[in-house]
Image (cartoon, rainbow, N blue to C red):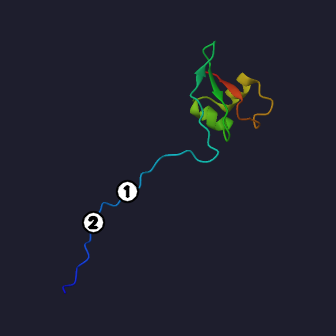
């Protein structure tokens, strides 16, 4: 009797699909919003600093501190809304 040869079938190997996800604890910050006086506002997200916010809106930390009458510029809480001076 003749020996049978195993049949090898080549199939395509599935490729990994990368799906972007947010890092744990990351939050999405809405773009600046204009209030009734035409000034922009920013909603503070976890990890935000006044320096980052000032840089994002092309203003200074001091200008944001004055516009919002912040007593301690080192204390920001997620959800705080800041007026961004133009």
Question: How crowded is the residue under tag 2: few (<14 C-alpha within 10 Å), some, or many (20+)?
Answer: few
Q: Residue furthest left?
A: 2
Name the side, left or right, on which 9 lies relative to 86.
left
Name which quarter of the figure residue 62 lies in. top right
Q: Which residue is mark 2?
A: 10
Callout in the foreground (2, 1): 2
Measuring 73% from the left and 24% from the top, which residue is drawn there?
68
Left/right placement of residue 18 relative to residue 72 reads left
**Mark 1 crowdedness (10 Å alpha carbons): few <14, some 14-19, many ≥20:** few
In the depicted structure, whether residue 47 falls above or below residue 2: above
In the orientation shown, which residue stands out farthest toward the bottom?
Answer: 1
Q: Which residue is mark 1?
A: 15
- Residue most toward the right? 71
Image spot of residue 8 (x, y percent): 26, 71
Q: Quadrant of the N terminus?
A: bottom left
Label 2 secondary element = loop
Q: Residue at x 71, y 35 (%)?
A: 78
- Quadrant placement of the C terminus: top right
């Amino acid at each position: 009797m003749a020996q049978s040869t195993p049949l090898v079938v080549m199939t395509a190997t599935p490729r990994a699909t990368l799906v972007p996800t947010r890092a744990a604890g990351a939050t999405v910050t809405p773009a600046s919003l204009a209030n009734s006086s035409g000034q922009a506002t920013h909603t503070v997200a976890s990890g935000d600093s006044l320096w980052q916010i000032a840089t994002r809106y092309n203003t200074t930390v001091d200008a944001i501190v004055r516009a919002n009458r912040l007593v301690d510029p080192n204390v920001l809480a997620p959800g705080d809304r800041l007026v961004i001076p133009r």
